[in-house]
Image (spheres, grey):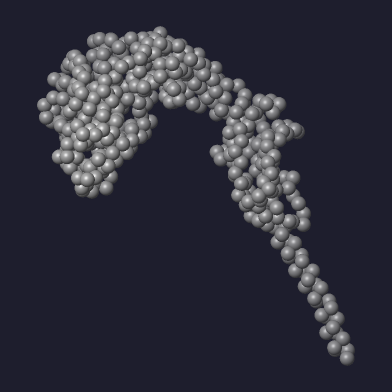
């Protein structure tokens, strides 16, 4: 009887103890489940007048219930946002723009805090603690911008230059041309804040649109000043291109991405893949190559046109492509086509560095030469290449030989001038006087000795007078 009674007492003691231990373990597990995690991307260093923030919240269990974004300064804080998430998903994304000055805080050091709560029950709540703290600097003062000198007269499809000074520090400076951002480059000692930027107006740039100098600091504070230049309209030609079956049968397999043979019934459809899609790829490549420019001029004097060449297709010529008696596409030709003898030498229009040499979709074998400050020239449809990526070349040095690679009907050179990847008319850069008046003059007025020379004597004696472009309606 005594032994049986001991077993009963053991059971009566052990079972509750096990239940208590299980309860403690369960509560401990509940308490140990990680709280909401927070990330801010990108991590801000500054908070300015209008600073965008993206906060990612992730809950392990129970879903994200609410959050609070604070700016803490000294002993006080300001709540920037306090959203709730009734749906309770485990992942939430919060996008907001912080008006730093409107919160009543002063410039200087502060801390960005993120507090968040999930829907998971715990014995002890510890939600009144930051799950993320980021040190930031409050900066509400935009940079100061002063336009020093600029090209007085701009034209559609043309170029120019503006020199300006930025004070107060800026991480992004340049020129806004109808929504296109053209970067500027330092044109003096860092402490001077003087910069210069080449301007490019697309061929269809509205003459009523503004050209402005813009500067933005790391806090997102921005300032702008107009460039009070007169913008002149230009008229550009139009022409037709008759597509022949023989030409398409030869070219389409070369230019299509899969390089497959095309049945005649699909010639028109395949041509559109080349003329639209591959042309778009080439345009994107030109803008990518523009980022590889040098922050100083590499050119000197007027750009040269190859000797004994004749312009037979013009810049910004709108081309209607016809096949089988029907218009199947319309594109704009962004350079000059220069004709001479077959496989003629192609000279570098000016000194620079090769940033591309190889096949370039519709352009065939091509060379892109960087002349600094975002100014580049493109040479296309070459039969052979005489340079490679990274080569430094002098004005007049042979880059290769003309040919008919790419979407070319016959042997010729397709030549483009690009400013930050935007095609502009080569006529301006073939003209030494235009360069002196539109590029050199604003540099002189701003006392910027950036160009080695803009005098007539600097022009290469081998340069032939530019051929007068002729309008050609069909090829």
Quarter of image, res 454: top left
In the rendered image, the vertical position of residue 24 relative to residue 375, given as above or below: below
In the rendered image, the vertical position of residue 313 relative to residue 321, given as above or below: above
Q: Give residue 177's position: percent from left, percent from top.
A: 43, 21
- Residue at the far top: name it: 445
Report the residue at 55% width, 38% height from top: 42
As drawn, is 225 to the left or to the right of 267? right
Q: Is residue 451 visible?
A: no
Q: Give residue 26's position: percent from left, percent from top.
A: 73, 64
Report the residue at 67% width, 26% height from top: 102
Quadrant of the snapshot with the N terminus: bottom right
- Residue at the far front: name it: 325
In the rendered image, the vertical position of residue 385 relative to residue 127, given as above or below: above
Quarter of image, res 238: top left
Q: Give residue 282's position: percent from left, percent from top.
A: 31, 35
Question: Tag count in the figure?
Answer: 0
Quadrant of the snapshot with the C terminus: top left
In the rendered image, the vertical position of residue 173 relative to residue 19, given as above or below: above
As drawn, is 443 to the left or to the right of 305? right
Report the residue at 81% width, 73% height from top: 16
As drawn, is 295 to the left or to the right of 354? right
Closer to us: 170 or 422: 422
Closer to us: 55 or 320: 320
- Residue at the far bottom: name it: 1
Q: Is residue 409 visible?
A: yes
Q: Give residue 408's position: percent from left, percent from top.
A: 19, 33
Report the residue at 84% width, 83% height from top: 8
Quarter of image, res 52: top right
């Amino acid at each position: 009887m005594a032994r049986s009674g001991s077993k009963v007492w053991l059971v009566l003691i052990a079972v509750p103890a096990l239940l208590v231990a299980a309860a403690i373990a369960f509560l401990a597990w509940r308490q140990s489940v990680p709280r909401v995690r927070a990330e801010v991307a990108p991590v801000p260093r500054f908070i300015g007048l209008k600073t965008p923030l993206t906060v990612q919240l992730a809950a392990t269990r129970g879903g994200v219930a609410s959050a609070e974004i604070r700016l803490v300064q000294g002993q006080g804080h300001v709540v920037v946002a306090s959203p709730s998430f009734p749906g309770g998903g485990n992942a939430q994304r919060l996008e907001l723009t912080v008006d730093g000055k409107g919160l009543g805080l002063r410039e200087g050091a502060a801390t960005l805090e993120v507090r968040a709560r999930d829907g998971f029950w715990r014995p002890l709540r510890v939600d009144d603690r930051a799950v993320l703290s980021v040190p930031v600097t409050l900066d509400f003062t935009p940079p100061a911008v002063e336009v020093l000198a600029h090209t007085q007269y701009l034209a559609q499809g043309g170029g120019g230059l503006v020199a300006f000074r930025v004070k107060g520090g800026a991480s992004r400076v340049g020129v806004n041309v109808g929504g296109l951002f053209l970067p500027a480059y330092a044109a003096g000692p860092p402490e001077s804040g003087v910069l210069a930027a080449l301007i490019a107006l697309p061929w269809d740039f509205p003459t009523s649109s503004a050209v402005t100098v813009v500067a933005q600091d790391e806090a997102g504070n921005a300032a702008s000043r107009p460039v009070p230049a007169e913008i002149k309209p230009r008229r550009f030609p139009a022409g037709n291109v008759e597509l022949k079956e023989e030409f398409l049968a030869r070219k389409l397999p070369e230019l299509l991405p899969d390089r497959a043979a095309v049945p005649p019934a699909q010639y028109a459809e395949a041509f559109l893949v080349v003329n639209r899609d591959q042309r778009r790829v080439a345009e994107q490549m030109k803008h990518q190559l523009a980022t590889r420019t040098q922050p100083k001029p590499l050119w000197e004097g007027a750009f040269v046109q190859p000797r004994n060449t004749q312009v037979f297709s013009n810049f910004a010529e709108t081309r209607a492509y016809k096949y089988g008696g029907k218009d199947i596409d319309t594109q704009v030709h962004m350079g000059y086509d220069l004709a001479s003898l077959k496989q003629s030498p192609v000279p570098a229009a000016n000194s620079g560095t090769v940033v591309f040499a190889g096949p370039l979709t519709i352009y065939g074998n091509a060379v892109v030469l960087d002349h600094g400050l975002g100014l580049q020239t493109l040479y296309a449809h070459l039969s052979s290449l005489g340079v490679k990526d990274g080569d430094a070349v002098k004005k007049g040095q042979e880059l290769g030989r003309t040919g008919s690679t790419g979407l070319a009907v016959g042997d010729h050179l397709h030549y483009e001038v690009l400013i930050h990847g935007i095609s502009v008319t080569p006529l301006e850069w073939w003209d030494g006087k235009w360069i002196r008046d539109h590029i050199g003059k604003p540099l002189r007025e701003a006392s910027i000795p950036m160009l080695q020379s803009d005098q007539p004597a600097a022009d290469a004696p081998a340069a032939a007078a530019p051929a007068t472009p002729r309008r050609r309606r069909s090829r």
